[in-house]
Image (tube, rainbow, N blue to C red):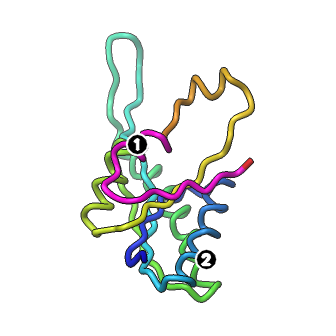
Amino acid sequence: MYKRILMAYDGSEAGQHALLECKDLMQWTGAALTLVAVMPHHIDFIGAEGGFYDPQITEREKENYKKILEQGLQVLSTAGFAANGEVLVGETISEITGYAKKVEADLIVVGHKHLDSLAARWWRGSSSGALIEHAHCSVLVAITQ
């Protein structure tokens, strides 16, 4: 069964649903859980000719991601489960899969909310699908309607 679970947590409704799934999995398996929040690289664009990087904006954003992560860890702690967490910075799929390899996770858990319109599904793409293609281990996608 699973010994190390990595969960990508963003604080969304789908993420909270996935957190409930993780609590159940931890109870059934006794697995260790690590939560990660992935913050994209932040570049502010001025115009067509380029952009600039503002470290103050990046630090504020990182603090926001830390708060989201701490909220998820607090939910687990209140329910009696121990977990650790980390904010990662970069491209979501590569950060999740790379960190999963680093901690030798045998399961990755993510939340996913079905989108109503075809246009919304097309525009957004499928992060869950891309994660499944790049992961070295099993992936559980907790679906929220």
Residue at numbered disc 1: 40
Q: Nearer the viewer, residue 34 or 66?
A: 34
Q: Nearer the viewer, residue 30 or 33?
A: 30
| Residue stretch in magenta | 128-144
Q: Secondary structure at mark 1?
A: loop
Q: Position of 113 compared to 105: left or right?
A: right
Q: Determine the image quadrant of residue 106.
A: bottom left
User: Is 126 within the magenta?
Assistant: no
2 or 1: mark nearer the eye: 2
Does residue 82 sit above or below 113 in this rendering?
A: below
Q: Secondary structure at mark 2?
A: helix
Question: Looking at the image, which residue sits at the far bottom?
Answer: 80
Which percent across, then down, holds residue 89?
35, 50
Which percent across, then down, holds residue 123?
57, 23
Which percent across, then down, holds residue 32?
42, 80
Q: Nearer the viewer, residue 39 or 145?
A: 145
**How dense is the environment of label 1, judged by Cα within 10 Å: few (below 14), some, or many (20 and up)?**
some
Residue type, mark 2 in image = Asp
User: Is 133 within the magenta?
Assistant: yes
Residue at numbered disc 2: 24
The residue under the point 43% across, 44% down is 57
Which of the two discs, 2 and 1, labels the residue nearer the N terminus? 2
Q: Determine the image quadrant of residue 36.
A: bottom left
The residue under the point 60% across, 67% down is 19
Q: Position of 141 compared to 78: left or right?
A: left
Which percent across, then down, holds residue 118?
68, 23
Q: Determine the image quadrant of residue 6.
A: bottom left
